[in-house]
Amino acid sequence: MLHRIMNMARAIQLGLEDLLADLQHARRENQLGRLALLTYCEVRNWARRAGKHDIADGATRMFTENPCVSKEEFLAKVDTVIATLEQCLQDSRSSEKPEVYAAVSLDHLLNTPRVQAGDLSTARML
């Protein structure tokens, strides 16, 4: 159970890293359509999976309630979304608990069969 939760949390973190890289690249290249797609679809999807409903709602409102009237306004809102996601990534990295990983590693080691010195033929097969 703990392993599954850790895998899910890691998948969410990796998804965020990928999403941020896509957003930052599209922002650097001034790809407005790509930024709109990523912000409306991908940010909302990631935020819902991560339980960050405020971010998902903000991305929705960015397009439905207060559509941008200029390119500069749109880019400013995208920059805010990027900064928010960067903060989420930083928070997730700082909240990782090394003792949890140590416990899982220790549990894995305790349940792994050990090779005795006289079992060299077995050791070669492993």
Image (tube, rainbow, N blue to C red):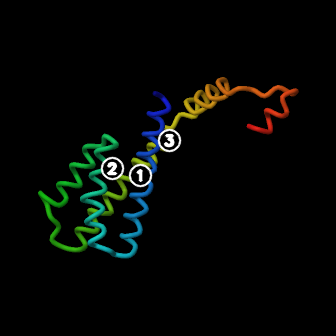
Q: Quadrant of the C terminus?
A: top right
Which residue is more in the foreground, 34 or 122?
122
Residue at the left extreme, as displayed: 65
Label 3: element kind: helix
C-alpha gap between disc 1 and disc 2: 7 Å
Q: Amino acid at mark 1?
A: Gly
Which residue is more in the foreground, 125 or 115?
125
C-alpha gap between disc 3 and disc 1: 17 Å
**Residue 33 position by quadrant:** bottom left
Q: Is residue 126 above or below residue 17?
A: above
The residue singled out by tag 3 in the image is: 94
Which residue is more in the foreground, 113 or 121?
121
Q: Is residue 89 above or below residue 39?
A: above
Residue at the right extreme, as displayed: 118
Nearer mark to the viewer, of 3 and 1: 1
Label 2: element kind: helix
Label 1: element kind: helix
Give the percent coordinates (x, y) of residue 111: 64, 24
Nearer mark to the viewer, of 2 and 3: 2
The residue singled out by tag 1 in the image is: 15
The residue singled out by tag 2 in the image is: 46
Give the percent coordinates (x, y) of residue 51: 31, 40
Q: Is residue 121 left or right of residue 56?
A: right
Q: Of the residues under marks 3 and 1, which one precedes in the sequence?
A: 1
Q: Amino acid at mark 3?
A: Ser
Q: Tell me what residue is drawn at x 79 percent, y 35 percent.
A: 123
Cβ–Cβ under 8 Å for marks 1 and 2: yes
**CA neighbours of label 2 inside 10 A, class few (<14), some (14 to 19), many (20+):** some
Which residue is more in the foreground, 69 or 46?
46
**CA neighbours of label 3 inside 10 A, class few (<14), some (14 to 19), many (20+):** few
Q: Tell me what residue is drawn at x 23 percent, y 55 percent.
A: 59
Q: Is residue 117 above or below residue 47?
A: above
